[in-house]
Image (spheres, rainbow, N blue to C red):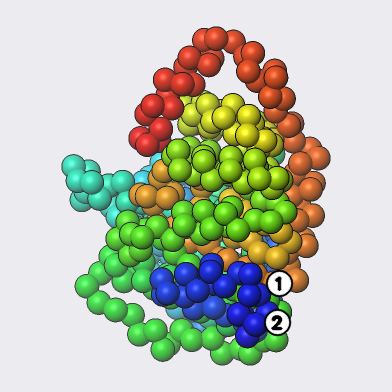
Amino acid sequence: AFLADHPVRKRIGTYLHNEGFPIYQNTVCSYYPLGELQFKQMITDLEQAQRFIFLSYFIVAEGKLWDRIHAILLQKVKQGVEVRVMFDDLGSITKISDTLSRELRSEGIQALHFNPIDKNIFRLLINYRNHQKITVIDGNVGYTGGANIADEYANLTQRLGHWKDTAIRMEGEAVWGLTVTFLQMWDSQFNHKSDYSRYIPTKTMTGNGFYQPFSDGPVNNPQNPAEEIYRQIIAEARQYVYITTPYLVIDNSMMDMLCIAAKGGIDVRIVTPKKWDHWYVHMVTQSNYKVLMAAGVKIYEYTPGFMHSKMILSDDDHAVIGTINMDYRSFYLHFENAVWICGSAVLPAIKQDFQEIFAISQEINFVEWKHRPYRLRAAQNVLRVFAPLF
């Protein structure tokens, strides 16, 4: 059905399928242009859980959002619901008490620090962080996107101004892809395999479009499907490619693909933050502007605050939403996850959000950019040499 309905997207769908990621139908998908909207619905779904709850996040931070979710998890455990919470040890180390896992386990919640720093501090493995963001409820409802469980992602606090993040909610067959990804990562920290049959979906949905949840990482999928999917979307574009990313730290090959697309008449637009969380990464991001703009790529900086969304949309008919930054860490070191969406009714909402992002962002003027202060240019160029370290 997929090949018949979308022959032009055969290559991407087939590639992901051959990498071990099935194509799903019968899924209803909703798009959330803000983290606070995502978490509002997610809390409602968590309150309705009956069998199990899986949460996997790079960052879990103490605050109002975590307190609300934690209260629900406690209530659900008392009702007999299985609850598993996984958070990256490095991502959360300064955000929560170092005894949180032990406290959660004492409450009946299965909790896991992914890749503990103290065990791998002198090994390359310390760089292999779990950057995935997954919520699965009863195997029937699943969320993924850029937001972590921390107050700034829901704009409950404004550390860097307005925080722009995006997410999708899936209900139906495609949720199984998120469930499998979660269980694979959980089991990787132990010497046993979960009984997957306990977590299969129980709800049948009728939906449109095709969905391929996929994951990426230095151990489970070293072929880097995340980077390859971005490359294929850019290469196959016929009208436009729109991208949001908090970091633009790319190699010459990816740079060339973006430039070739723009020179070929494709409307290529990239949105990065105006306000940054890591100054040195932002400097490297900006060091790439000149070459891209010279080729015709349009660069925007999100002025209301911090752009943390990770999306790519092309030609009205397919998109990727998930945890993938356009940088070396996402493409080569981190465990990531995302969903490739094709032919879905949710795509117009994603495009509409892009248009609203462009309207409130500042487009960088190429002539003015070329004449920015010499010291700034020099610093950016020096830092770009060390880009793979960022």
- Tally the marks: 2
Q: Amino acid at mark 1?
A: Ser
Q: Nearer the viewer, residue 266 or 273?
A: 266
Percent x, y of residue 48:
63, 78
Q: Nearer the viewer, residue 79 or 18?
A: 18
Pointer 2: residues within 10 angstroms few (<14), some, or many (20+)? Answer: some
Against 204, residue 331 (above or below) is above
Image point (57%, 30%), residue name: 291
Against 34, residue 26 (above or below) is below
Image point (65%, 82%), residue name: 4
Percent x, y of residue 151:
59, 47
Q: Which residue is mark 1?
A: 344
Q: Give yes or no for contact between labels 2 and 1 (Cβ–Cβ under 8 Å).
A: yes
Against 333, residue 279 (above or below) is above
Which residue occupies the extreme top position in the image?
374
* SS of the residue under disc 1: loop
Residue 241, labelled with which disc? none
Q: Amino acid at mark 2?
A: Gly
Image point (38%, 27%), residue name: 385
Is any atom of residue 65 visible in this view? no
Against 378, residue 222 (above or below) is below
Q: Which residue is mark 2?
A: 207
Is any atom of residue 146 visible in this view? yes
